Image (spheres, rainbow, N blue to C red):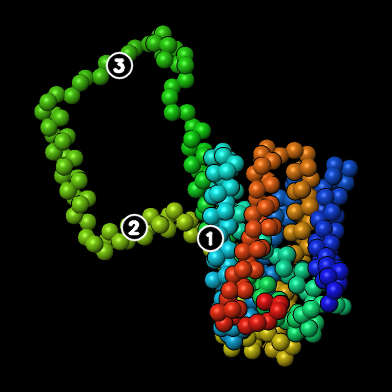
Amino acid sequence: MGLWNLFVVALMPVVKVLLMTAVGVFLAIERVDILGMAARKHLNNLVFYVLNPALVGSNLAKFITLKSLVMLWFMPLSVLITFIAGSALGWLLIKITRAPNRLRGLILGCCAAGNLGNMPLIIIPAVCEEKDSPFGDATICNMHGLAYATLSMAIGSIYMWLYVYNVVRIYSSTASDETKPDAIPEGLESAREITPGPKLFLKEPSINEGVENFEMDRAVSKGKAKIPFPENIKQGFQKVVDKLNLKRVLSPSINGAIVGFIVGTIPPFRKALIGGSAPLHVLEDSAYSVGESAITITTLIVGSNLLKGFRGSKMPISVIIGIMAVRYILLPILGVGVVKCAVHLGAVSSDPLY
């Protein structure tokens, strides 16, 4: 297969995505104003709470079985390596560009997440259906490709909410704390001095009161030190849970992934819901139809958000170029290297699509 044919096969899915993005940009311009700020907000909520969970859950249930899950055991590890490498490259980018504190969490999140998301569900079927595709029969390519893309999307969603969300949240809270004034503004001290009204004179504590307070503090500290070992572990676990914000970790997408894994890998559920002869297949078909619209709507939202970026961004250009280099040059090269090493070591099958 010639280089030009390979280029055309790879280009067509990307053109498809770019065309949908361009439609999103058009719908967001002021003259049209179909995808204005209010519309985007409502669509984002729809995607987050309904469409994405349906997409992840229905695809997992349809394309992932216990057998394919065992065959694709390396996929979660591969995605984890991507997140670790992306985080390291993001940290390096922060050091090189000297990005301000308010942007550090965002940079780490953008670099760590890599190129995981819904796009492979557009790109892989389009590549499989191309006339000169190097991946063999279109039906088998489509089935295997969607299994790969679905599992990576589900694992990526879990890592995204467990890791990226919390990194951005922690950095954002740190940056907001730094912006709070620590000292009394100038002029406030003098204003307080000339404010009319009665002044309260505080009595200084006596030596006896100081001794009593000291003894009380010692008693409290001793009480804290005598916390039993299991209780100590419980308190530590509670702190970790509070830091992780489990309500956000168990996002709708992760709940959808859990349901999809259960239906896809447990035979009784699979027989009842998956396939044309399944008695409850209408439920899975409905969820799949709802989920399919998530890709189109998400791409339109991305296009409408780009319009705001065209009008000017407060992010330094060096940071933008750095994130693009990490996501679209360094991480893909690293990903190819990881898969090549895994194939060489016999950890995964030598399927060209994988």
> Which circle's residue, 3 or 1, is located before the other in the chain?
1
Residue at label 2?
Answer: 236
Residue at 65 percent across and 68 percent down: it is: 336
Q: Is residue 39 above or below residue 125?
A: above
Residue at label 3?
Answer: 200
| Placement of the C terminus among the 4 image quadrants | bottom right
- Viewer-proximal residue, 318 or 179? 318
Residue at 61 percent across and 54 percent down: it is: 111
- Viewer-proximal residue, 295 or 193? 295
Q: Is residue 109 above or below residue 81?
A: above
Residue at label 1?
Answer: 84
> Which circle's residue, 1 or 2, is located before the other in the chain?
1
Q: Is residue 251 above or below residue 95?
A: below
- Viewer-proximal residue, 77 or 154? 77
Q: Amino acid at mark 2?
A: Gly
> What is the secondary structure assignment of the residue under circle 3?
loop
Number of numbered discs visible in the structure rendering = 3
On screen, residue 51 versus residue 36, left or right, reads: left
CA gap, disc 2 and disc 3: 43 Å
Q: Looking at the picture, how far across and down is residue 34, in whole percent? A: 83, 49
> What is the secondary structure assignment of the residue under circle 2?
helix
Around disc 1, counting alpha carbons within 10 Å, would you say few (fewer than 14), some (14 to 19), or many (20 or more)? some
Q: Looking at the picture, how far across and down is residue 295, in whole percent? A: 75, 64
Q: Amino acid at mark 3?
A: Leu
| Placement of the N terminus among the 4 image quadrants | bottom right
Q: Looking at the picture, how far across and down is residue 139, in whole percent? A: 78, 84
Residue 272, quarter of the rendered image: bottom right
Q: Amino acid at mark 1?
A: Ile
CA gap, disc 3 and disc 1: 58 Å
Residue at 66 percent across and 63 percent down: it is: 332
